[in-house]
Amino acid sequence: MNTHLWRLTVRDDFAAAHALRHYEGKCERLHGHNFAVELAVEGQNLTPDTEMLLDFKVLKTGLKAVLEALDHRLLNETPPFDRLNPSSENLARHIWRGMEAWLAGQADPQARAVRLYSVTVAEKGAQSATYMELPPLAAPRG
């Protein structure tokens, strides 16, 4: 029997400046981006009344709340990037963790029932970094 699954995706952006530490090239100097962010969640149970996995509005509200701390900031001076390199990879992981906490803190059981699938951060349209947390691989049989 097949397992059914729905995946929802929302997108937002934020503007920020950063300088990549230990990078040999122009990006080691202070520069800015309009970072594009894509968030995907998945789940199996639709609400009985609206037949939705989760209202897009709820996801967009959460993503906007997480991005607010990064928007129009110098990332190198904004925790945790005052210690971590403000790379797209680290930004994607940071946003994941923020959304994970935000969803867990919601009163709406549908928000707590979805699981994060991925967070993608793009500095430009042509390249992006995606963060996911996958369950451990099963041990080989036999």
Image: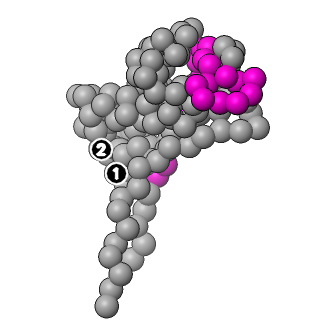
- Give the residue at x 32% y 76%: 139
What is the distance, in whole Å, between disc 2 and disc 1 at their CAs? 8 Å
Image vertical order of residue 118 relative to residue 139, above or below: above
Is 22 left or right of 53, judged from the image as shown? right
Q: Mark 1 points at which residue?
A: 45
Circle 1: is it few (<14), some (14-19), or many (20+) Cα within 10 Å? some
Label placed on residue 113: 2
Looking at this view, is 67 or 29 the one in front?
29
- Give the residue at x 75% y 23%: 26
Point out the tag, 2 or 1, that comes first from the N-terminus: 1
The quarter of the displayed image where residue 3 is located: bottom left
CB atoms at circles 2 and 1 under 8 Å apart?
Answer: yes
Looking at this view, is 39 or 125 the one in front?
125
Q: Can residue 61 be seen in this view?
A: no
- Give the residue at x 41% y 50%: 133
Where residue 46 appears, x then y in whole percent? 37, 48
- The residue type indicated by label 2 comes to Ala
Q: Is residue 9 magenta?
A: yes
Q: Where's the N terminus, which quadrant?
A: bottom left
Image vertical order of residue 65 relative to residue 49, above or below: above
Q: Is mark 2 on a helix, strand or loop?
A: helix
